């Protein structure tokens, strides 16, 4: 997992994970990160349910920094819990924790946190947050598609738009290759659909176990600046920049 590899390369060896319990998406990301991180020598010192109504953002940051001695907090929320993540990011500067300690707690996360609302609501509290996402307009394989989309619509697009575009192309191809298209025949045909990179949002597409396997994960970081008109930041004070 790219996010786990990045953490270890950055010297992050102890993390606390915040996720939504009993949420398939959130738990799957948490488990994948944990496995990759531990296999390479990292340690998950604690995990916490972001949806717990008793969760206190300030106290969780305090525990992570002082008790757990964590190098980073890793967030795998669903969209509904983004505000909780932002509250925790703001709590890094609370009075209970010396400022230099709070700032030493790095922030990592999953693709649910990628979006204009995150930038606008988080502002400086989320500066430096690193996310793993399926697609970025700055990635080498996607630049041409991202530029065409920007020229057509006058603004940047997100990985969600790129994924929807690829899914639509795959369904169209599956329908065309089905002799008598039906729900069952199209779904069956999807398993064998393969599209070259020049026909997608930037990377070749194929399916495995019913899921598309065309995306090379990309890491992005929240940095100051509005970015250009194609950056999908809607000219907010911060934008997502690809991590080299």
Image (cartoon, rainbow, N blue to C red):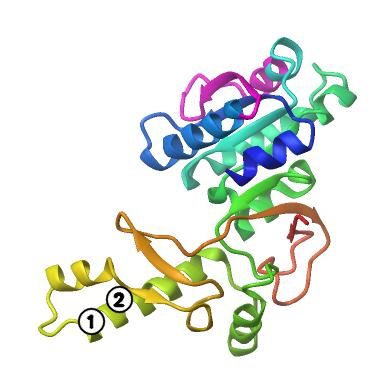
Question: In the displayed image of the protein, which residue is found farthest to the bottom?
Answer: 152
Query: Which corner quadrant of the image does residue 39 belong to?
Result: top right
60 versus 193 height, above or below = above
Nearest the viewer among 46 and 122 is 46
Which residue is located at x 45 percent, y 33 percent? 20
**Looking at the rendering, which quadrant does residue 238 occupy?**
bottom right
Q: Residues within 10 Å of mark 1 (few under 14, many from 20)?
A: some
Q: Residue at the spot x=79%, y=31% of the render? A: 11
- Name the residue rendered at 32%, 73% in the picture: 193
From this viewpoint, which residue is outermost toward the top? 67
Label annotation for residue 17:
none
Taking the magenta stretch, the answer to whether it contains residue 44 is yes
In the figure, residue 150 lies in which quadrant?
Answer: bottom right
Residue 107 in the image: state x and y as whole percent.
71, 37
Q: Residue at x 27, y 66 (%)?
A: 191
Relative to the observer, which residue lies in front, 146 or 12? 12
In screen coordinates, is 75 left or right of 125?
Answer: left
Indicate whether 95 appears above or below 166. above
Q: CA distance from mark 1 to mark 2?
A: 6 Å
Q: As displayed, is residue 171 above or below residue 57?
A: below
Of the 4 image quadrants, the one containing the C terminus is bottom right
Left-right relation of 77 to 168:
right
Residue 72 position, x and y percent, is: 71, 29
Q: Where is residue 196 shown, x and y percent of the image? A: 47, 79
Find the magenta span and give its range.
40-63
Classify mark 1: helix, strand or loop. helix
* Image location (x, y in percent) of residue 209: 31, 54
Residue to which mark 1 is pinned: 175
Q: Residues within 10 Å of mark 2 (few under 14, many from 20)?
A: some
Disc marking residue 171: 2
Discs 1, 2 touching: Cβ within 8 Å:
yes
């Amino acid at each position: 997992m790219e996010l786990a590899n990045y953490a270890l390369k950055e010297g992050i060896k102890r993390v606390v994970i915040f996720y939504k319990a009993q949420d398939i998406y959130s738990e799957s990301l948490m488990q994948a990160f944990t496995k990759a991180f531990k296999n390479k020598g990292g340690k998950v010192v604690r995990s916490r349910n972001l949806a717990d109504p008793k969760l206190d953002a300030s106290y969780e940051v305090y525990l992570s920094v002082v008790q757990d001695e964590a190098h980073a907090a890793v967030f795998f929320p669903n969209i509904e819990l983004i505000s909780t993540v932002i509250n925790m990011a703001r709590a890094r500067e609370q009075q209970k924790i010396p400022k230099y300690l709070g700032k030493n707690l790095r922030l990592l996360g999953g693709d649910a946190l990628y979006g204009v609302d995150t930038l606008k609501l988080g502002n400086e509290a989320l500066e430096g947050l690193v996310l793993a996402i399926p697609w970025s307009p700055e990635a080498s394989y996607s630049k041409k598609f991202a530029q065409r989309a920007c020229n057509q619509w006058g603004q940047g697009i997100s990985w969600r738009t790129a994924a929807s575009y690829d899914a639509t192309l795959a369904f169209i191809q599956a329908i065309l290759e089905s002799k008598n298209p039906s729900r069952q025949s199209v779904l069956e045909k999807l398993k064998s659909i393969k599209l070259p990179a020049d026909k997608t949002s930037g990377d070749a597409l194929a399916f495995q176990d019913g899921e598309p396997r065309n995306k090379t994960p990309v890491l992005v970081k929240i940095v100051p600046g509005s970015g250009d008109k194609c950056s999908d930041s809607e000219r907010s004070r911060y934008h997502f920049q690809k991590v080299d």
